[in-house]
Image: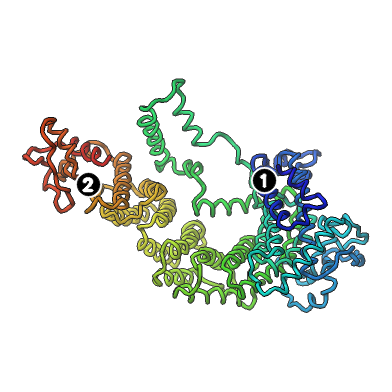
Amino acid sequence: MANMVLSLLSSAWFPLDLSAHQDALLLAGNLLAAAAPKCMCSPWAGEEEGGPVPSKTEEPWAAVGERPLVVLVEQLFSHILKILNICAHVLDDTPPGPAVKATLPSLANAPSLSPIRRKGKEKEVAEPSTTPMSPKKGSETNTGRPADSAGSTANVNKSTTLGSFYHLPTYLKLYDVLKATHTNYKVTLDLHSTNEKFGGFLRSALDVLSQLLEMATLHDIGKCVEEILSYLKLCFSREPLMATVCVQQLLKTLFGTNLASQYEGAQGGPSRSQGKALRLGSSSLRPGLYHYCFMAPYTHFTQALADASLRNMVQAEQEQDASGWFDVMQKVSNQLRSSITNVTKQRGDKNAIHNHIRLFEPLVIKALKQYTTSTSVALQRQVLDLLAQLVQLRVNYCLLDSDQVFIGFVLKQFEYIEVGQFRDSEAIVPNIFFFLVLLSYERYHSKQIISIPKIIQLCDGIMASGRKAVTHAIPALQPIVHDLFVLRGSNKADAGKELDTQKEVVVSMLLRLIQYHQVLEMFILVLQQCHKENEDKWKRLSRQIADIILPMIGKQQMHLDSPEALGVLNTLFETVAPSSLRPVDMLLKGMFTTPATMANVNTVQLWVSGVLAVLRVLISQSTEDIVLSRVHELSLSPLLLSCPTIRHLHDDSSLSSPPQLPLATPATVAPDNQEANGERVLPEETFARFLLQLV
């Protein structure tokens, strides 16, 4: 399918239909993006062996395992660069032609001007220059644009850049079509039309480029980084959002944090779920109803309890689903360290990366300016992600925002967020706080740009503003919790009374939102870190959490409205100190307390979820004798629900009609575990009848 689509793109007539061309680009990109992960391989395989054998990364697109697919990827990549070059010429109002800047062969450090900007050279020089992003000397600052036709070489021909198109008649016709379309767009009054062809076509091309960069390595794009950046710089004014996405993808490719460089180990060994399936289905007989209703759930349950023990917590963490927020954060930080080692140590391209990173400066400056003038939340999010990525790559933020104008604008946005005058603020709040937490490590003239107490104060202001906790306060707290308890908590140099005070403030904020399972997930992380650092602190916090959660479960105040939420609560009970869940009286009282009404389905779901969580704790952390003795001592009544059929079966009076029992609520529960006739009920029967009524 991809081969057929690419053959259409290379034909003489098909590319001139912009709508069909745009759809074909998206289809080809999606097909390759879907096929690539299935045939991915590590581009660093075999590098440790050494020897005179050339490295696998010398091959083009080494991360793509199937060589026939590489031909299609290269063809699409070349086509996309030609399209971007055409769009850059159209936006810059420059006619296509060969490069003329073929002099100055000795200036290797400063790339010469691109032919698509030679007409506007004076305008480019007039733009304010800033300090280079990389820690190079000021004399190495790049004041020119990267060349799209390799202008720094003495002999320029039509094949020096992948994006050259002036010698290809088909692309020249496409240039004429796009230029006419863009001219019509400039004279129209509807500047935000969704049917505008040039903008949609450019967006699609940038989208496909971002997909291809996910499969590329430094070896694949090292020679055309300047070329790509030159196109993105000109396209930024027309499509800033997708241009910023491509800049991020380009950085990921250079530093080895994209899919191609991180694929190592993804296919190692059978998965945990596969192992369970093998054990459950080891019998040669076909499983029956008993197996699916009893044996399979019981086996899964016992394995889950075994994996949840504190002794196996480290091993269990490595096998758990890495889809949570904190798992992603830890994975990204680990990837960044390992990938930079792969790219620099084994390939020896550290200097090349530093040279490349300087070329991003003009685009980053444009992105900062666009953030302060745009009302697009999607664009602002992308710019914040780009800045966060640069800070993580050890780029000095103060060199980008020397006057602190950008950070001042970001802090000013909180005034509008708190009063509800910021549209779609829930989409940008997580990005802002993640960026601010990263900036807390940066300094401006030996002074901290922003402190953690200031960030906590901003978060507390959002909580006090009455905005929804799930959309504003909780996403704001997540990066703060991760930074305080994982990053700073593990650093002995940061330990001190000030850090402990900040942790206590954050914990008190979390306790105010403990009914949400996203907060329980953060408490799991906090408890794990406390257990590593101070066992007494771990036990105190565990008792504090248990004393709050257990009564809320009995009152159906915990938001256990999904399997995910119930799973997080189960994990929390496995993480707290076992002593905090003893005695079992609180567990039993909460479990045997029924809702005031069963008419509301949501209330019943919350009640059942709470009962399931408590049952799991009783099974895993208590014994049958203790539970039954406490049921007897607490005089818990088996008459919890209005269930005449159960009473009818218990009395074994099949000929008589079942009596109608009123619904029992916590206020009308019998004072002791007695039947209506005064006969005492055994605790085993009380517990069994409760479970039967629950089912």
Residue visible at 61% across and 72% down in the picture? 371
Kind of residue indicated by mark 2 = Phe
| Position in image of residue 39 (x %, y %) | 67, 39
Is 461 drawn above or below residue 217 in the view shown?
Answer: below
| Position in image of residue 674 (x %, y %) | 10, 41
Name the secondary structure under disc 2: loop
The quarter holding residue 94 reads bottom right
Q: Point out the tag, 1 or 2, that comes first from the N-terminus.
A: 1
**Pointer 2 residue:** 592
Q: Of circles 1 and 2, which is in front?
A: 1
Q: Which quadrant of the figure contains the N terminus? A: top right
Residue visible at 70% across and 58% down in the picture? 206
Left or right: where 640 falls relative to 142:
left
**Pointer 1 residue:** 31
Left or right: where 101 falls relative to 33:
right
Kind of residue indicated by mark 1 = Leu
Left or right: where 509 falls relative to 486:
left
Of residues 453 and 572, the one drawn nearer to the viewer in this rendering: 572
Of residues 529 and 415, the one drawn nearer to the viewer in this rendering: 415
Q: Which residue is most to the top?
A: 284
| Position in image of residue 305 (x %, y %) | 38, 38
Is 233 drawn above or below residue 590 in the view shown?
Answer: below
Q: Is residue 445 visible?
A: no
Of residues 439 and 20, the one drawn nearer to the viewer in this rendering: 20
